[in-house]
Image (cartoon, rainbow, N blue to C red):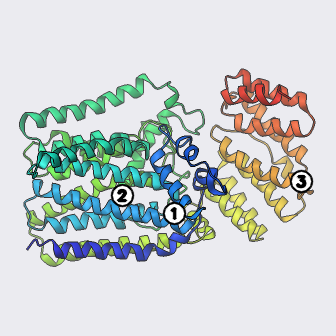
Amino acid sequence: MNSPLPPSVALIGVIITLVLISWHGLSGPLVFDDLTTLAPIADESRPDYQKFIFNNASGLFGRAVSMSTFAVNHRLRGSFRNFELKATNLAIHIANGLVLYCLLLVLLPRVNESSHYRWMAVLISALWLLSPINSGVVFYVVQRMALLACFFAFVGILCYALWRRGGHSSPIVKYLYLALCLACWPLAFLSKENGILLPFLILIIELEFFSRGKSYRVLRAILLSSCVAAIIAVYVFRNHELLSYAGRSFTLVERLSTQPVVVAHYIRDLLIPVSADIGIFNDDFRTVTSYANFATTGASAAILFMLGFCFLSPEKSANRGVRAGILFYFFAHALESTAIPLEMYFEHRNYLPSAGIYLAAVLAGQAAITRYKIGRIFTVLFPVCVLAWFTFLSYHKAQAWSSWPQVVMNIYQHHPRSARAGLEMASVLTDSNEVNAALKVNELNALYNPTRNLNIKLQRFYIFCASGNFVDETEYAALTGPIYPGNGLGAATAFDLLFEVRDRNSCPNVDFDRVMNRISEMLDASLESQLITTKQAWHIEYYLIEFDRSSGRRERALSRAKRSNEGGNVKAEYYYREVLRGH
């Protein structure tokens, strides 16, 4: 009844399906930080691979393991090929699914008496592999970091489970599993920082699948104490550089108020996905400004209820596997979905944690089927329909990744109020010579995102440059208003584009002096009103200084740089000392 052959064949069928539906997306474009991450060796005939791997600025620990795999891709061909980069990602994703399946074969018999545990392992692995959120990670090349961190986490947990299961043919095999488990920890966090959580994930596996009696109570106390300690640490170190929100448009309180809602959205989209949104831009996600909010309260209550179920239900409960899945999900989110000042919402953060959600969902469903004696037809038909729906959405997500215009149209279709999506859509329309449509998108973007006014207004001048259209006096007059925190990086991209066309002398219809003088007034007024700090303003200030310097206004450039330098900005200090005063 529980022969390994049919489930294995079914899993192979799932993998073949995944490859087929992903195929068109593998030749799609590199996007955003793909380009900046790979740039140091992308066009080099004699690249410095050692520097690329060990001196990159990706994350706290450098992510050398992930960078080494990109170096291998480059070394094999002498250049980067989009298809090969994404095909490598797909291979890692498939490997992760296979390791997850092997792990479930070890763990499920310990908490589930069903003779169909192999089929349950196939179902969980298939849901995880075909999930639109997880399959989409493959096409965003730089997310190989998330793929590899997950791989080493799964392998580390599998080795630990095999070590704990016992029954080894020799002590050497037993301790080899333990050594491999220990080795996977640095490999995981050198792929991406959330790999640092591997010991906690192993602790959850030990708690729910292996421990009994006193050890169970001790481990549960350790996990609960870790949660309390993390909360206290955030309060104590809230002013530490690691928790600095200087470059963000939201505060620590706003992030902590919003994250419960974000996590609730993640769970909904993992279990009941409704669109093929490729999920790159989510800056339109509504920021919650305080804890006293209905959405935050409701989402927090639901999360606390699930955690309460895990920590307060009896040790001998038949729901140990469900508890393990829930705890795994929330602890795997502990780094990226709490207090660290990252982007508010990114689907790829669910890549590793989602294994826990699918484990909990399948085991809870199996318990309900057993308790309520649900018929065999529904038991088989419902999972097949869910997998078919996941496959359908993942196929359309892969199609959306097939070209850059398709990527942008997908983003804008699902996020019409996103400032970033609006900027990219207007840019694509401009490149297609659809100037009126581009200006219309730009107008709507400004209407929807008043706090992102600078980069949106700068793009408007770029559209005029690219089209050669006459710039009406009202366009210069509209370049006014406050500059808000978090505008710097987006404005930097807009400045780069404008400076590029100016340096090519291909934009005679725009008066750059007037544009930069207006921005200078906007920035000065925002600094004077303390809406932003000199540190937050540096990305914009830098371009104003460079423009003054290249236009022969050296004294004004020095004055502006000196102000930023005296504001305690390290980058401004270096620029003032080494660049301006050195000339």
Q: Which corner quadrant holds the N terminus? A: bottom left
Residue shown at the point (56%, 40%) measured from the top left: 55
The quadrant holding residue 126 is bottom left
- Closer to the chain start, of discs 3 and 2, is 2
Question: Mark number for residue 268?
Answer: 2
Say what amino acid the circle numbered 1 marks.
Answer: Leu
The residue that mark 3 highlights is: 510
Circle nearer the N terminus (1, 2): 1
Residue 374 shows up from this direction: yes
Residue 266: give x, y in percent of width and height: 39, 54
Judging from the image, what secondary structure is the residue with disc 3 in? loop
Q: Quadrant of residue 574?
A: top right
Residue toward you, 298 or 258: 258
Label 3 – label 2 distance at C-alpha? 48 Å
Q: Is residue 378 above or below residue 118?
A: below
Query: For the residue carrying disc 3, how many other residues have a C-alpha within 10 Å: few (<14), some (14-19), or many (20+)?
Result: many
Question: Nearer the viewer's eye, disc 1 or disc 2?
Answer: 1
Label 1, on which residue? 85
Q: Looking at the image, is 56 positioned above or below residue 580?
A: below
Q: Residue at x 24, y 67 (%)?
A: 123
Q: Secondary structure at mark 1?
A: helix
Looking at numbered disc 3 in the image, what kind of residue is underneath it?
Answer: Val
Q: Residue 267: horizontal and vertical position, in percent?
A: 35, 55
